[in-house]
Amino acid sequence: MNGKRRLVLIAFFTLLIFLSGSASATTFHVKVGGGTEAYGSLQEAVNAASDGDLILVGEGRYSENVLVNKSLEIVSESSHPKKTVITALDPELPLFHVTSGSVDIGGFSLKGANSSCGIYLDKVSGSNISNNYFSGNWRSIMLRDSHANSLENNRLSDSDDGIWLENSGQNLIRNNRATCNRHYGFYLNASENNTLQNNCASGGAVGIYIENSSGCSVLSSKTSNNFYGIYLIGSGGSLLEKNTANSNEMYGIYLGNSDASTLRGNKANSNRWGIYLDSSSSILQKNKMSCNNRNFGAYTYHYTGEMNNTIDTSNTVDGKPIYYLVGVSDRTLDSDSNAGVVYCINCENITLKDLTLENSSFGIYLYNTQSSRIEGNHISNCEHGVYLGNCSLTALRGNTVNSNEGDAFILSRCSNCLVEENNASDNMAGIWLCDTSTDNLLKENTVTSNSWCCIDLGDASSNNTLEGNILSEAYEGIYLYGACKENILNNNTITASSYGLYTEGCCNNTISGNRISGNDIGMSLNLNWTDGTGSDYNTIYNNYLNNSLNTEDYGTNTWNTSKTTGVNIAGGPYLGGNFWASPEGDGFSETASDEDGDLIADLPYNITETACDYLPLLLKAPEEKNETEDGKNCDKSKSARRKSE
């Protein structure tokens, strides 16, 4: 009985304490101009109130900055925030500076703190900011070192930023609308495990920006007509679900260095990029991207990390499935797959053929994938066409890659790959070998009308062979830079470009058998633009040169080989130097003397004060023909014999 009596007494006194607390809560009224039963300012009411009290604010316009250092409920009597307007008396101070937890503020229009915040939660928790209109402030709502608060049903407009969180976690940000803010609609920095749900952000620089804030959830929110829609950086373990990102100037949804995140059921339409993933170990399911300039992308062309994301074919681009294969072998994807974009990561023996791919960052992307084939595909209107990174023994054959913003084909850190009989036109560049790509063969490709260059070798790529390619209408037909060495450029045709061949700091390459004509400058061998290294010790012979200016040589190079029996590019019987023509028909090889008839000029051709072609080639003169009485051609010697007879 004693135990039961004790429990009853405890319950009784607890109830008394609760009733006593409720009874002690006081309601304070604020009205414009004040009065006998109302305060004339919010700050007066706050000063008079105690923790747990209610402050009711009448309709009208107030000009003040309010320090809230008690746990209070401060609400407007009106159901419409526009009828109760508070303008900052001092624009450099917050309209509401909240330093106590468990504060509720709702039902106001707050404006004019153009150097501060509408509401500033400063090291507080358990507060609720709801049903307010903000405009013309520096930041509408700011949280610093504040946790477990809720920000709901607020309108945030015409400020620098809408809602801004620093070092503030486990907050609920729901049903807010941010419009026409100059910078961020919603900004989180170093703020973990926050939930953003059913918010809208439009007309700003960034709709939702989350930086160094892991474990956040962005749910059922809409971002439109911003520069960036939803942008996460350094915020792993996040969840983005059922969001819509439309008509943003750059990215609809971007994840940078935000590993182990999940994107599920999002829609990205009519952005420049739909969804772009620069993170690893993430999961993508049922995301739909359509009508974006670049629907889907993952990583950049210099990426060297892991790419083991889980992305299944429930993700679509313009209604076509994404194939993101990781660790797959012996697989063929052809036109029956209806693929919209293809990624192969750590794969082997993959065949991709007869696919039509467009409007993504890459049409085909292979990383650390070996012994594969890419054949007969059509790729257009992507950022880049085909990318191979750290691949070997892979063939690219018979593909048509046109009208892409960047490069048609990129080979980075690749070896023993074949790029053959492809067609690339109207891209920025045709074929780019970079990052020490070695022992690759580029053969019989047709590359035309590219704004930068047709074939580009850089970053110490060596022992590659460029053979039989037809290259035209670019700034540079072939561009070698960055210590590329021991490459062979043979039997290529380069026309109608600013430079046929342009090198910077590249040595010990062999350039022979090429027809370089109709360019502003045929060959230009230059210093390296970064460290001053010259283009030296290249061997250049048996090329046909007919350009406005045939050569520039700022290095130390050899412009002929030894005189050797063999048919040269001008049809003569010996290999030696190069054929030097001009568009006017008065080039050195077209006018030089040849007393011994070997079709090697009697005198060397001085290219610069220090560079010389000692064995310039000459063109064999055609035999003169006459007509016989019956109209048949014969040479003059035969005609002369007949006359003598």
Image (spheres, rainbow, N blue to C red):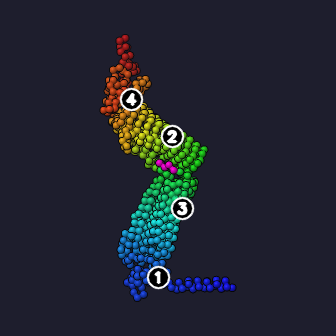
Q: Amino acid at mark 3?
A: Leu
Q: Residues within 10 Å of mark 1 (few under 14, many from 20)?
A: some
**Of helix, strand and loop, which one carries label 2?**
loop
| First in residue order: circle 3 vs circle 2 | 3
Q: Is residue 254 left or right of residue 347?
A: left
Q: Amino acid at mark 4?
A: Asn
Between disc 3 and disc 1, the foreground one is: 1
| First in residue order: circle 3 vs circle 1 | 1
Q: CA distance from mark 2 to mark 1?
A: 76 Å
The residue at which mark 3 appears reads as 239
Q: Amino acid at mark 2?
A: Ser
Q: CA distance from mark 1 to mark 4?
A: 97 Å
Question: Looking at the image, which residue sits at the far top?
Answer: 645
Q: Is residue 304 magenta?
A: yes
The residue at which mark 4 appears reads as 560
Q: Which mark is residue 50?
A: 1
**Of helix, strand and loop, which one carries label 4?**
loop
In front of the other: 219 or 96:
96
Residue bounds of the magenta highlight: 301-305
Q: Residue at x 64, y 83 (%)?
A: 7
The residue at which mark 2 appears reads as 415
Q: Residue at x 57, y 86 (%)?
A: 16
Q: Amino acid at mark 1?
A: Ser
Q: Residues within 10 Å of mark 4 (few under 14, many from 20)?
A: many
**Of helix, strand and loop, which one carries label 3?**
strand
| First in residue order: circle 4 vs circle 2 | 2
Q: Residues within 10 Å of mark 2 (few under 14, many from 20)?
A: many
In front of the other: 267 or 526:
526
Q: Main secondary structure of the magenta part?
A: loop
